[in-house]
Image (cartoon, rainbow, N blue to C red):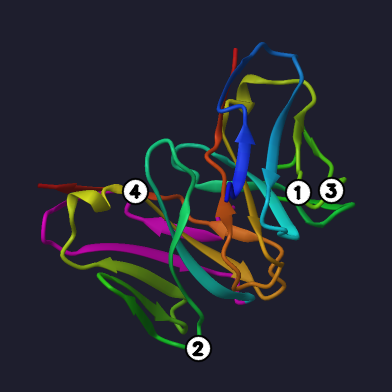
């Protein structure tokens, strides 16, 4: 049972480059989300999806795009990388959007933009 | 603005001691309060959670205390062990369940 799988684990980008962070879950969860983790700021919500074809913005969406074409996959796209996007990115999924369901996190992607 | 405020930022405790981490929130629409534990290089994992209709929940050495009127909740780790050394995040989720809002995190170190 793989749970939530993120790739790559590490990435270095040059300013202005674009890339896609991959996230896949095999638990048939309908709710998926992306967070970024920065020192002293906890985890901040970037984008989330309540089901295939439905996405919405979180707290810090600027500079990022998402899509949800299947239940399993929720990729995060950086359109034009900036040093301010240097962070650790986590994808999470949960069974439903009900408040008391556990969120399962991937291992994270450490991104450095130079 | 940070909707969930967590303190302290870091905490050092001796083995066998009690670790206490505090969180406060403003949004009265929050109705689910989980705590997540994160080890270096790993994603956060659910540790324990509470709903506001109870004032305390205990699971082994971990206890959440909840004060609805003060809009505060805290994590107590009894008999702290070196293996508890990790970063702890409090969080809160609204009734609609569409967003999980995290505190800033507390880096706990338990010395042997």
Q: Could you classify mark 3 by the number of other residues whose Cα lies within 10 Å: few (under 14), some (14-19), or many (20 or more)?
A: few
Q: Nearer the viewer, residue A12 or B67?
A: A12
C-alpha distance separating marks 2 and 4: 28 Å
**Which secondary structure, mark 4?**
loop
Q: Are marks 3 and 1 in contact (CB under 8 Å)?
A: yes
**Which secondary structure, mark 3?**
loop
Q: In this figure, which residue is indicated by the disc labeled 1?
A: A72
Q: Could you classify mark 2 by the number of other residues whose Cα lies within 10 Å: few (under 14), some (14-19), or many (20 or more)?
A: few
Q: In this figure, which residue is indicated by the disc labeled 4?
A: B9
Q: Answer with the quarter of the image where residue A64 lies.
A: top right
Placement of B15 over or under B26, stated as above or below = above
Placement of B75 over or under A41, stated as above or below = below
Q: Answer with the quarter of the image where residue B56 lies.
A: bottom left
C-alpha distance separating marks 3 and 2: 37 Å
C-alpha distance separating marks 2 and 1: 34 Å
Q: In this figure, which residue is indicated by the disc labeled 3?
A: A70
Q: Is residue B19 magenta?
A: yes
């Amino acid at each position: 049972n793989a749970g939530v799988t993120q790739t790559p684990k590490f990435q270095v980008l040059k300013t202005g480059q674009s890339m896609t962070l991959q996230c896949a879950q095999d638990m048939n969860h309908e709710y998926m989300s992306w967070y970024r983790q920065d020192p002293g700021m906890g985890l901040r919500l970037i984008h989330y999806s309540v089901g295939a074809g439905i996405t919405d913005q979180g707290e810090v969406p600027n500079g990022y795009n998402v899509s949800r074409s299947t239940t399993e996959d929720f990729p995060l796209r950086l359109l034009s990388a900036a040093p301010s996007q240097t962070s650790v990115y986590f994808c999470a999924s949960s069974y439903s959007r009900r408040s008391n369901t556990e969120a399962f996190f991937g291992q994270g992607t450490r991104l450095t933009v130079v | 603005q940070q909707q969930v405020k967590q303190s302290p930022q870091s905490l050092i405790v001796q083995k066998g001691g009690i670790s206490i981490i505090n969180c406060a929130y403003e949004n009265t629409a929050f109705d689910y309060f989980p705590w997540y534990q994160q080890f270096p290089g790993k994603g956060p994992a659910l540790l324990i959670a509470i709903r506001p209709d109870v004032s305390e929940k205990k699971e082994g050495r971990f206890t959440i205390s909840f004060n609805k009127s003060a809009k505060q909740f805290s994590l107590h780790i009894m008999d702290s062990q070196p293996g508890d050394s990790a970063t702890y995040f409090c969080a809160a989720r609204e009734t609609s369940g569409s967003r999980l809002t995290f505190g800033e995190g507390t880096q706990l170190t338990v010395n042997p």
